[in-house]
Structures are given as C-alpha cells and as structure tokens.
Amino acid sequence: MQFYDIFNGDADGICALHQLRLTEPRASVLVTGVKRDIALLERVDAAAGDELTVLDISFARNAEALGRLLERGVTCRYFDHHFAGKVPSHPALQAFIDTSPDVCTSLLVDRHLEGRQRVWAVVAAFGDNLAAAARAAAASLGLSEQQLEQLQELGECINYNAYGDSVDDLHYHPADLYRTLARYTDPFDFIGGEPVFDILRNGCAEDLYRASEITPQPATAACALYVLPDAAWSRRVSGLFGNRLAQQHPQRAHAVLTARPGGYRVSVRAPIANPRGADQLCRAFDSGGGRQGAAGIDLLPEDDFMRFVSAFRKAFD
Ligand SMILES: [Mn+2]
C-alpha cells in the first residue's frame, strides 16, 4: 500500500500539503510540477488499496484519470478551488471543493484541520493573491503587521518559484522546495534562517525589475495588457507581476502575455474590486481555463492575438 501526494507546485499546493503532513506525517510519493502543470493524475500509476491526496489542481482536468484510478480500487481525498465541472459521488472519493473567489485550497485544508496549521494557510492565501482572505484567516493568530508582511513575501516567493514552462525555468523543483519547507513548522524560522528563501527573494526582485520596464498596450483606467518576451525570467515572473499589478490597481483588470513559439501564454486577473469574468474570457479560447478572479490560456496562437485583445477589452473596459 502506497501513499501519493499530488499537488500544484505553487504556494497554495505546497502549503496545503505542508499543513496536512504536519498534522498527519507519512512517507509518500510526491507528484507535482510547474504551476500550469495540472493534469497530474494521469502520471499516477497507483494500485488497489493505495491512497491519493490531491491538492489544488482542477478536478475537471483530472476527472478522467481519477475515474480510472477509482475503478482500480484506489481511494482519494481531493481538495481544490478551481473550476471543477461535475464531481461524481463515489464511496472511495472524498471531495472538498469550493470555487468561491475568496478561498484557496490551503484555506479549505485549514477548514478541514480546524485551524491547526493556520499560519501556513495564511502564507498560501497571500501566495494566491488573496490578501484580504489571508488577513482574515490570520486574525486569530495575533501576528504583528510586520509579521503579516513577512508571510506575504514568503507566500509570493514560493508562488514565484512555480512559474515556468518546465521545471528547468524554475530556481527549485517544487518537490524539492516542499521537502525543504517540510523541515520547518514555523514559517518565521524558514524566513529567518533558510538560504533557499534568500535565493528566491533575490531572484524574484531581479525578475520583477525587468518586467517593470515594459509599457502596457492597451492601458486604460479599467484594463491593461502587457507583453513579456520569450525568456526564462518572463516565464518565472509573469504570475507575480500580474498579482502586483492587481494589488497596485484594484479597480483594473490585467492581462500578462508571455511570448512563446507560436503565440503567447496568457494570464488574466479580473479587478480585485470585482473578481469575476476571468475564467469566462479565457475559456472562450482553446486551452483556456481557471477561476473567476484569475485565469489563463496555455497557448494563444499568434493569429488570435487581436481577437483576445478585443475580448479582453469587451470583458473589462
Ligand atoms: Mn490555489
């Protein structure tokens, strides 16, 4: 009998797993990847009696592979907040799915664990750009404003590490980052004493500086669109750059397009003040998906660029 922990490589996925394993330690096979690498269940070759824990990857994208595994006699606990489609009821499946715009997977795990590792859910919510939800969850922890800002930076740095076309673009493989983080029960010890954190923080600052030199086009009071070049630093920073823009301009929607062979990888953030419409816009294009406040398109073909610009303006301008 084997345990599998299958998780998104971003801050939300890593911190969701960390909360669970601090509470229920176990040796497991780790299955993860870059943030957009979400069809993870098709990689899992589990057998009857094996137990899967799945965190922060869309149920809709994994339903078929999960169905096959359940038929084989595998049991599964599934926590997620992305678009889910239809979730079948099955005796071996426990699903904790909530797609409300103000929750993330780590907050669902926090709910399940009744707050036992809440500080890590706060880190994750900051990483998922849910600052208000992070602060609300932190209210019971008695943290100072400075500590909250440190947790925000930690969440953003872990999240930053998950962005790239492949793990080659990343500073650390998300499974290795999780294993490093797993040695710490207190995030402030990780922040204060772990060299990995300094490397992420410095890499992040450098990449953000390069992105800040780009001029958006179009740019109005209601929406702005940025195009980043085809480079590893663009692929690493696009998500955090989008989150920073969203925080700086809470009334404005943002699209960050990163050039890649054949077109663009697209990341859309609806205005924080009205976090809706991002998923609908992106699902109108092949390979688009996500949640109401933040969504993306894996490959927007070069020929669809103008169609995307006008759909983006129509949705938000
Ligand atoms: Mn998430």
Image: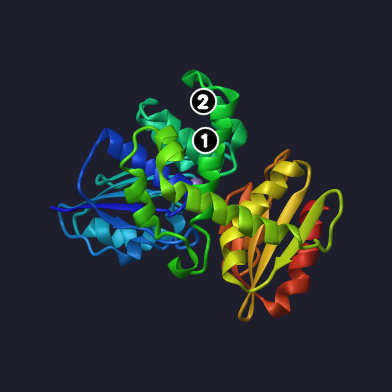
- Considering depth in this image, is 262 or 83 the residue closer to the camera? 262
281 in relation to 166, above or below? above
As shown in the figure, which amino acid type bears the numbered disc 1? Leu
Q: Measured from the top left, where is residue 223 in percent x and y?
A: 80, 53
As drawn, which residue projects farthest toward the left?
1
- Asked if residue 107 lies left or right of residue 24, the reply is right
Q: Residues within 10 Å of mark 2 (few under 14, many from 20)?
A: some
Residue positioned 73% across, 57% down in the render: 212
Q: Nearer the viewer, residue 176 or 277?
A: 176
- Color encoding of the figure: rainbow
Using residue 292 as the reference point, say whether residue 140 is left or right of it.
Answer: left
Q: In this figure, which residue is indicated by the disc labeled 2? A: 138
Q: Residue at x 73, y 45 (%)?
A: 271
| Residues packed near mark 1 inside 10 Å, few (<14), some (14 to 19) or many (20 plus) | many
Say which of 243 and 317 sits in front: 243
Q: Is residue 236 visible?
A: yes
CA–CA distance in space, label 2 to label 1: 10 Å
Residue 95 seen anywhere in this rendered image of the structure: no
Label annotation for residue 151: 1
What residue sits 51% from the left and 27% below the top? 137
